[in-house]
Image (cartoon, rainbow, N blue to C red):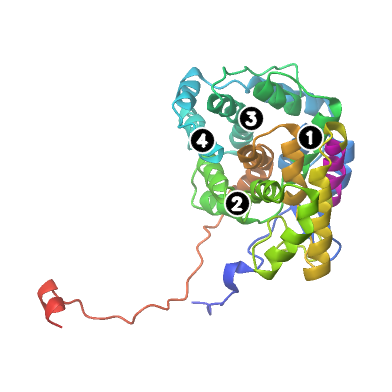
Amino acid sequence: MAENIKVPKGLAGVITDDTSISKVMPESNSLTYRGYAVQDLCEKCTFEEVAYLIVYGELPLLTELNDFVIKERKYRNISDDLLDVIKKFPKNAHPMDSLRTGVSFIGMEDQRIWDDSFDTNINKYINMLAKIPTIIAANFRHKKGKDFVSPNNNLTFSENFFHMCFDKVPSKEVVKAFDVSLILYAEHSFNASTFTSRVITSTNSDIYSAICGGIGALKGPLHGGANEQVMYMLKEIGEVNNAKHWILDALSNKKKIMGFGHRVYKFGDSRVPTMTKYAKKMASSTGKEKWIQISNILNDTMIEEKNIYPNLDFPAGPAYYMMGFDIEMFTPIFVMSRISGWSAHIIEQAANNRIIRPLSSYVGPAQRKVLSIKDRNTT
């Protein structure tokens, strides 16, 4: 047996496998998808193009994009059975729990559960890409006691989501900001939820199970759930005049400041400038500049006092809030995007698989004798 290797807690700095999907480059604060800088993709591509790129490896030609879009739109409707299940969800349940259950349900409806061939997994990916927004929107309206709004196949991916949630499509500026957020959230190397999905896939489990695992990992406030916590923090601060005192008091009391710091980026998340640009556009178009003003004070103070920079969740949270989404919707929206990255990693893991099975360093009691209950009571 090869000599065991002791690695840092949390696998910090450990390279566990190869990937051709994305690269986080902390030395240059850059992120690329299949070699393309994410900020360039945001300005020149739609989310549909990026959802194709991440899984197929190349940006689509026009005919390829059209075929991909037609398939995605064809799969948007969810079954009446699933709608009935959504109607039974507790209205106080977190939407991430509802979404996880919904993905499990569409997995149960798929008779190809053990077929993990490339073509079938691609088809399953497009099926989830199309249906996950419908599940989120249906649950959103259920929680508010409103009727479901069916998908509109004449609308883009982002336009259709607003349509299903609010029964209307906002301005092009709002849709573009939302589309950009989806591109920025679509993939980010071996993060916790992606690694979870790859571990599940490595057991030869199915893609739906792996995606459910990813959803479970993403829910945590130290991962995807941070965008929700950012907005709760901003709402707690409330007004611009409170921001400086709040952040200094939080730092002096060693309170966790959500939306700051990153395991990989040390000098700022490369996605932040682009998302901040569009969050500011949202503030200008909605007249809710105070959220940006509060954010600016927190950002400047954190850098000045701790030299810690914001991550993507910091501008994304208030951007979603200004778009009209409930705070608990932020992480499910993240899933709408990250389904692309997860699926690409699942397919990549399955193509050259070895079960992911690390060891542990045992620190419990040495082997000892089992006493009968009588003897345990007399010692």
Q: Which residue: 74% across, 29% down?
A: 158
- Residue to which mark 2 is pinned: 193
* Camera-nearest label, 2 or 1: 1
Mark 4 neighbour density, 10 Å: few (under 14) some (14–19) many (20 or more): many
What type is the residue that disc 4 sits on? Answer: Ser
Q: Quadrant of residue 285?
A: top right
Where in the figure is residue 97, as x and y percent of width and height?
Answer: 51, 40
Q: Which residue: 63% across, 37% down?
A: 329
Residue 281 on the magenta segment: yes
Cα separation between marks 2 and 1: 22 Å
- Residue to which mark 1 is pinned: 179
What type is the residue that disc 3 sits on? Answer: Pro
Residue 27 on the magenta segment: no
Q: Quadrant of the C terminus?
A: bottom left
The span shown in magenta is 273-283
What type is the residue that disc 2 sits on? Answer: Ser
